[in-house]
Amino acid sequence: MRTKQEHSADIRRDRRAVLVVNTRSRRGRLLYDEARQRLAAAGFELLGAYALEQSGGLDDLITEALGLQPDLLIAGGGDGTISTAGRMLAHQDVALGLLPLGTTNNFARTVRIEPDLDAAIATLVDGKVIDVDLGMAGDVPFTNHVGIGLSAEVMISAPPRLKRVAGRLAYPMTALGLLARHRPVRATIRADGRELRFHTHQVYVANGGFHAGRPITADAHADDRLLVAYPVGGATRRELLRETARNAATGHRRTLHERPFLAVRELWLETDRPVAVEVDGEPRGTTPMRIAVDPNALRIMAPADSPDL
């Protein structure tokens, strides 16, 4: 595998890339042609350009795109699209370029790529290759988070049409509908010789600094060799709603040293009954589950002044 410096130099010199856009994402269909034209104008040799128009099939498109042996795979879409691309590019000599075209764009925000087409393409032109961590939920790589409890039921239940129409509001709207009948769980996290117990409707384990398009804490990012585990409120619905609002309002001021955050490299999570798990918005079985960091597993194209640990 090339060094990151060699990889960056090859991308700047040869501009060999493939483009994969989920045109079912919020802005994917609107911006697909424009993105392709702007990349060509920026000097990229697009070995292939793919538009995903139906559910399913993204893995096959990425596999086909990788068969063209690009230096850079540019993925356009939301967090689910980026997560799939990240999983498939793990430990490969291909960098992931991001066009954040989705609803929340958590991973792109974590690596300092704003959801603006001009800024994202400028990063592909002038940026550099760095490597960042992935999480592992069992044997499934993830870029953003694992959700246990209510969020998994929301992801399973949120109507696709509502997501297209309401955007990120589709998730809290679905959650409010489910909350009236949702039962809290007793969750136990074991890590670093410690044991933490929670009675809550929701537990997250995040790789990076953003959730729902907002900061989790001021000092979490995707290249720190850490996962951030935290419950959202206690056993009552009022506590869940209050803590959700607090997280949204104060995340940019909080640190990993504050309660209720637990920052570790690996953990074991179990619940008093099997509870649904979602990994980057996709259902992935039930608890119990081992969740761990896969350090420096993914190469991405990031802004030129990005730290690279």
Image (tube, rainbow, N blue to C red):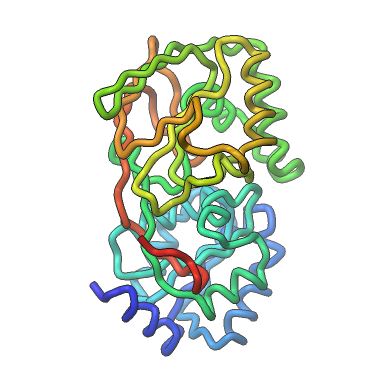
Residue 6 found in image quarter: bottom left
Give the residue at x 50% y 75%.
Answer: 127
Give the residue at x 56% y 32%.
Answer: 155
> Which x, y percent locates residue 163?
68, 41
Residue in the foreground of this view, choosing between 27 and 149: 149
Q: Residue furthest front?
A: 257
Seen in the picture, residue 4 relative to 217 is either above or below; the reply is below
> Which x, y percent locates residue 42?
59, 85
Position of 55 compared to 86: left or right?
right
Seen in the picture, residue 198 relative to 269 is either above or below; the reply is above
**The N terminus, quarter of image:** bottom left
Seen in the picture, residue 112 relative to 202 is either above or below; the reply is below
> Which x, y percent locates residue 161?
70, 40
Residue 139 can be seen, yes or no: yes
Position of 34 compared to 69: left or right?
right
Position of 245 compared to 267: left or right?
right
> Which x, y percent locates residue 91?
28, 60
Residue 147 can be seen, yes or no: no
**The C terminus, quarter of image:** bottom left
Give the residue at x 52% y 11%.
Answer: 184
- Number of labels in the image equals 0
Q: Residue furthest right?
A: 165
Residue 92 found in image quarter: bottom left
Give the residue at x 30% y 70%.
Answer: 93
